[in-house]
Amino acid sequence: FDEAAPRRLERWQHEYWSRRDWITADLEQHGEAHFWRRYNERQLTTVGVTGPLADHAAQMDAWFRAEFTPDALVPPDVRDTLLHLRRHGWVVGLVSNRTDDLAPIAETHGLDDLFDFTLSAGQAGAWKPDPAIFLRAAQLADVLPGQAVYVGDNYFADVVGAQSAGLIPVLIDPRHVFPDADCRVIHTIAELRSLAAEGRAASIHLTDLR
């Protein structure tokens, strides 16, 4: 691989999962049984792999099914940062493109007492970057869109969507995947404390789930 391949792949992954039309088209064309193999073929193409892509993709699919266990991790600075924001009068919400209610997830990770509301795409009936889910979040926070700061880790879903809805976007980019982002960029959750100190908005919405 060339040196830029990892960043190129991650940017492609972010864009793919923000495009519900792409996902729907792949599911309709390939079916659930072959969806992930097709996805893996696209990943391999993105990083410049040549040769029998179908064979390589099948091997990747078999490895993931046997070895990969998805796990949601909460960075160590999240709880203290959320507490800090709430103490400074910010309304804090959790918004995600997941279909199911997010409240049980927040409770599982011991964060349920730190969110004023949670909002899943399934509840909103809209998926990021659709402006509707961002506008619904602003309604739940009881603020105007321009008073809300939306923090997310996917430029294509979070920043583009927040901008289109009139919210203030902040991109959290710990691996510097989007060095040319046209918005404020932070690299750790703890950096949100400076945002609170600036008093740039009355509400903040955090999303760390894609």
Image (cartoon, helix red, strand yellow):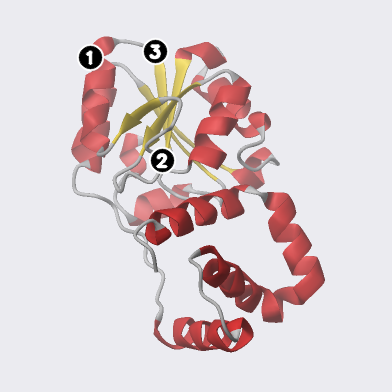
Whole-percent x and y of residue 139?
A: 58, 21
Q: Is residue 116 visible?
A: no
Name the residue rendered at 37%, 37% in the picture: 179
Q: CA distance from mark 3 to mark 1?
A: 10 Å
State whether residue 101 is above or below residue 50.
above
State whether residue 124 is above or below residue 53.
above
Whole-percent x and y of residue 129?
A: 62, 37
Mark 2 or mark 1, which has the lower sequence index? 2
- Closer-to-camera residue (11/136): 11
Is label 2 or label 3 in front? Answer: 2
State whether residue 51 is above or below residue 30.
below
Q: Which amino acid type corresponds to the residue marked 1 in the rendered image?
A: Ala
Q: Which amino acid type corresponds to the residue marked 3 in the rendered image?
A: Ala
| Relative side of 137 to 151, left or right | right
| Relative side of 195 to 48, left or right | left
Which residue is label 1 attached to?
A: 197
Q: Is label 3 in a helix, a strand or a loop?
A: loop
Q: CA distance from mark 2 to mark 1?
A: 25 Å
Q: Is label 1 in a helix, a strand or a loop?
A: helix
Which residue is label 3 attached to?
A: 201
Q: Is residue 160 visible?
A: yes
Name the residue rendered at 57%, 47% in the picture: 97
Which residue is label 2 attached to?
A: 178
Location of the N terminus by quadrant is bottom left
Within 10 angstroms of label 2, few (less than 14), some, or many (20 or more) residues? some
Within 10 angstroms of label 3, few (less than 14), some, or many (20 or more) residues? some
Residue that protrudes farthest toward the right in the picture:
28
